[in-house]
Image: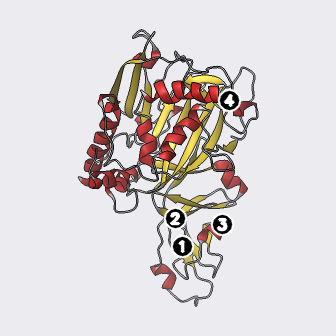
Amino acid sequence: MLSNEANERLTRVGPGTPMGALLRRYWHPVATVIELDSDPVLPVTLLGEHLALYRTEQGELGLVAQRCPHRGASLAYGIPEEGGLRCPYHGWKFSKIGRCIEMPAEPESSSFKDRIQIPAYPVHEMGGLIWAYLGPAPVPLLPRFDLFVRDDLTREIGITRLPVNWLQIMENSFDPTHLEHLHTRYMNYVQKRKGLPPLAEERHHLKIAFDIFEWGIVKRRLLEGQTEDADDWRIGHPVLFPNILAVGASGEPQFQIRVPIDDTNTLHYWYFTKLRQPGEPPQQEIPIYECPYTYEDGRLIVDTVFNQDMMVWVTQGAISDRTTERLGTSDKGIILYRSVLEAEMQKVERGEDPLAVIRDPARNTPMIEIRREQKAHFSGGGFIQDSFSGGRSFVTKSPIGVS
């Protein structure tokens, strides 16, 4: 179990908190390109800060504090113009670095505007997502992880907004043995209740292991019936520090990105890809869709791997009470992740760069290739949703890996 103080240190992400300081050293996606195409100004919240994301007609991106310092109106309803964003209330205009550059109602000779500055942050587009950096200068490079920049992939982005703290989602990625029960025994129980045959083959974990590498932590498992040359053990599933899970065989790899909105809400991106077929034209637009975790009556959906994961994340509460937990030897991945988070928070407190922050362009160009399994050795694991054929809900179809 953790003390309440330790749990607070790991879960609170707002300004001035140790975890908030660590997470502000990384780039996070805050919206999709297609959302910004539909509305050029969007309200977004990241790490407890309420912000306005915008794109001007000239294509310039900006991210500034949502509250106008004049009378408090929301800049998320502002007018994007060349050079910045104009408040809808009295027309104060702010540049992408947060400087007030126009005050229409003030005398032309006034220097008042020169004394007004609001928080503003760098933003970049990559892989159909808009990424933001809320940390101090100098700004690190936006990591060019392979699935975001490869030119041979077709992509889709699922979005789920979950009323939970980001950490309990991430800890699930360091918990291999839940596969035996949540995604096999429980899956088959759900199937039985629906009058359907078993879907998953139950196999015991012979051993699990975790390795720290330059981009995060690799989770490895060896199941009954596998040999040590199985990809699950030899390669494993990387977690890109601090909050991206990489899973899926080489033909349909995916990322799961867990973005802390605030202490009790997380924006979850399901970043699905598949190899483009020979002769298939390049993708012009990346489709997005909402991925539900409840039915209309509020009951949690539990008949797919992804939804089963979301069920256990949500039922732990807004912030899991780790003062009452009892961890065993099979939880060593969770223990390791927490220790790495603590070590990296301490690095930030000493003024050092934490794990996987990139400043050398040579490490980032042309892309960062993530080693992943070539084929799925386990047929009862995770499943990609049927979105590539037009579906909008999770449907168990193609085995691509396990959570």
Question: Which amino acid does the dot numbered 2 rest on?
Answer: His
For marks 2 and 3 on the same chain, the one whose residue lies earlier in the sequence: 2
Looking at the image, residue 41 lies above or below residue 155: below
Question: Which amino acid does the dot numbered 4 rest on?
Answer: Lys
Alpha carbons under labels 1 and 2: distance apart: 8 Å
Question: Which amino acid does the dot numbered 1 rest on?
Answer: Arg
The label shown at residue 50 is 2
What residue sits right under mark 1 in the picture? 67
Q: Is residue 190 left or right of residue 323?
A: right
What residue sits right under mark 3 in the picture? 80
Which of the two marks, 1 or 4, is nearer to us in this view? 4
4 and 3 marks in contact (CB < 8 Å) = no
Q: Secondary structure at mark 2?
A: strand
What residue sits right under mark 4 in the picture? 194
Alpha carbons under labels 4 and 3: distance apart: 51 Å
Choose between 71 and 222: the one closer to the eye. 222
Which of the two marks, 2 or 3, is nearer to us in this view? 2
Which of the two marks, 4 or 3, is nearer to us in this view? 4
